[in-house]
Image (cartoon, grey):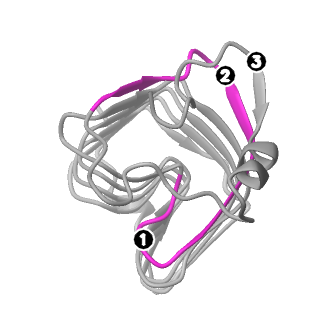
Amino acid sequence: RAHGMCADTDAVVDLRKYIAMMGGDDFTPIGTYSRYAATCDGGGQTLGGLKVNASGDAGLFGTIGREGTVRHRHLHTDGITSTDYLAGGIAGTNYGTILACTVQGDITGNIDAGGIAGQNYGTIAACTFRGKVTAGSGAGGIAGYNYDTIIGCYSLATSVTGGNNNAKSYRLA
């Protein structure tokens, strides 16, 4: 279990209380020090109040490894920011699989930022983003930069701003 965020039974979990209990204002992304390599099935649960302000990859997960899967996770953010690298609602960098997740909120990355992942080297499928994305380089409603597969995703972004907007790079199957 990743910080107890993958199998809680409450329909909505307000992360502000969890973050305050840990003695801080911001959440430290799961997979910050090593790539997340397990399965996180959110069971449709919504996490609210997520606020990340990190110097590395920022999101609920910093980096999801090739063996990692995050699915059925719904997220309402109070802002996700990476001051130095990549930012995404679910992950700063994805090498694994992100399936049937939704993110609502503002995402900001110094390099690449996306509503679901800052950079995608894996698979993102059946995901939705609603909010604003701002990046210094690549910005996208689903991924700031996509190197692999994005299938059946929807961006309802109110604004996507960056040096190189990459919405056109998505391969839909």
Which numbered mark, 3 or 1, is in the foreground of this view?
3
Q: Earlier in the sequence, mark 1 or mark 2?
A: 2
Which residue does the numbered mark 1 point to in the structure image? 86
| Labels 1 and 2 touching (C-beta < 8 A) | no
**What kind of element bears circle 1?**
loop
Q: Position of residue 94 (x, y in %)?
A: 31, 50
Q: Position of residue 35 (x, y in %)?
A: 27, 50
Is residue 54 one of those drawn in magenta?
A: yes
Q: Is residue 62 left or right of residue 72?
A: left
Q: Nearer the viewer, residue 21 or 35?
A: 21
In the rendered structure, which amino acid carries the disc numbered 1? Leu
Q: Nearer the viewer, residue 25 or 130?
A: 25
Residue 31 against residue 25 in the figure, above or below: above
Which residue does the numbered mark 2 point to in the structure image? 45
In the rendered structure, which amino acid carries the disc numbered 3? Ala
Residue 104 against residue 72 in the figure, above or below: below
| Labels 3 and 2 touching (C-beta < 8 A) | yes
Q: Residues within 10 Å of mark 1 (few under 14, many from 20)?
A: many
Q: Earlier in the sequence, mark 3 or mark 1?
A: 3
What is the span of residues highlighted in magenta in the rendered image?
A: 38-59
Q: Where on the picture, by quarter, is residue 15?
A: top right
In the rendered structure, which amino acid carries the disc numbered 2? Gln
Q: Position of residue 151 (x, y in %)?
A: 36, 34
Q: Residues within 10 Å of mark 3 (few under 14, many from 20)?
A: few
Please tell me which residue is depicted at 68% across the width and 12% down the height of the picture: 9
Q: Is residue 39 left or right of residue 60?
A: left
